[in-house]
Image: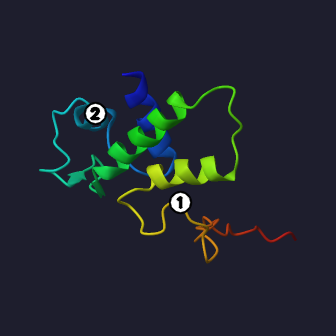
Amino acid sequence: MEKAQFIYHSNTLSHITLSLQQTVDVLEGKINPLEEEELLSPTGDTFETSVITSHLNALNYILRFPIHKKIDEAVIQEIHKRLMEGLILSNGEYRQCPPELSIPQIPQLPFPKIP
């Protein structure tokens, strides 16, 4: 359950709105990622089950990583490769363009006229 909670909260930070129960069900094998490649989230969005399984792969790699070993560029790229496996073609590689940023629009409030 700890891994499921970690993956659920980490995915939530990336705006992946699958529920904790859906995450647990995939990790426990109640939902087979080979049979159900996509899941409908409670918000109505659809996500690939690989957002959970690849996250588990990356997390297990990190947890098995020797504590005395240096974390270098190759290790970070390997973590990214595992995390994004099945989600993007360039997993483990450097981005060739800037990330798309969405900056929330702040509504303009009407200012009262000062007499």
Residue 107: x %, y % from top left: 62, 67
Residue 3: image x %, image y %? 41, 28
Q: Relative to 15, say whether 61 is above or below.
A: above
Q: What amino acid type should be assigned to the residue bearing mark 2? A: Leu
102 relative to 38 in the view: left or right: right
Kind of residue at badge 1 = Gly
x 35%, y 59%: residue: 86
Residue underneath mark 2: 27
Q: Total label count?
A: 2
What label does residue 92 carry, if any? 1
Q: From the viewer's perspective, is 81 left or right of 70?
A: left
Horizontal relation, residue 92 to residue 114: left or right: left
Q: Residue at x 41, y 37 (%)?
A: 8
Q: Is residue 89 above or below residue 35?
A: below
Question: Looking at the image, which residue is at 38% across and 61% down?
Answer: 87
Q: Quadrant of the C terminus?
A: bottom right
Residue placed most toward the observer, 24 or 86: 86
Q: Secondary structure at mark 1?
A: loop
Q: Circle 1: is it few (<14), some (14-19), or many (20+) Cα within 10 Å? A: some
